[in-house]
Amino acid sequence: MLHIFVDADACPVKEEVYRVAGRYALNVTVVANSWMRVPSDARIAFELVKGSFDAADDWIAGHAGPGDIVITADIPLASRCLASGALVIGPTGKPFTEDNIGGIVATRNLLSELRGAGEITGGPKPLAPQDRSRFLQQLDEAIQRVRRRRGPGGA
């Protein structure tokens, strides 16, 4: 069954995920390094992970697979989930794909090197209303894509 995993510690679109998942009656697992409140809904689970900085990423990468959708802004996690067959969407609605992940990883590494050399590169822009709209559209499209792959009755 299609499952949505949310890398939740800094995810600004959790409410949107809950709303869309409720419309499609899908299960959601919210994964975080610290406790957070999630809706009281049998289809929404919260997974608190302890340990290393990447513990939530490791948990998601270990559970997500073909036919699942992962919501994350974390580029290395997106790459790992794509390799396992999951669909991955960033909170701004930008899909991570096999076609674009290499360039995204390279850009991330370049910016990291620049920051390490003392260059000020700035952080991500605040989430704009059009980002939320694009995210909702991409999530809906990803759900439809998975359902088409699974055929009639396959959620």
Image: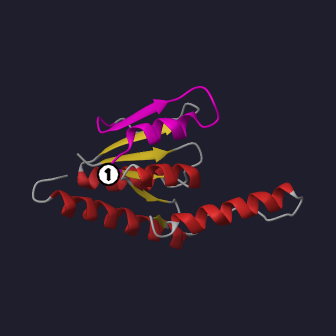
Q: Which residue is mark 1?
A: 21
The three-letter code of the residue at mark 1 reads Ala
Q: Residue furthest left?
A: 152
Q: Residue furthest top?
A: 50
- Viewer can see residue 126: no
* Element at label 1: helix
Q: Is residue 76 left or right of residue 25?
A: right
- In this view, the residue in front, 81 or 152, is 81
Q: How many marks?
A: 1
Q: Residue furthest right?
A: 118
Q: Is residue 153 left or right of residue 59?
A: left
Q: Quadrant of residue 153?
A: bottom left
Q: Quadrant of the N terminus?
A: top left
Whole-percent x, y for residue 148 in the image: 19, 64
Is residue 94 located in the magenta-colored stretch of the structure?
Answer: no
Q: Quadrant of residue 47?
A: top left
Magenta segment boundaries in residue numbering: 41-68
Q: For the point 55% across and 30% down, which residue is it? A: 35
Q: For the point 60% across and 37% down, which residue is it? A: 54
Residue 18, compared with residue 144, is above or below; it is above
Q: Quadrant of residue 105?
A: bottom right
Is residue 63 located in the magenta-colored stretch of the structure?
Answer: yes
Residue 105, compared with residue 18, is above or below; it is below
Crowding around mark 1 (Cα neighbors within 10 Å: few <14, some 14 to 19, many 20+) is many
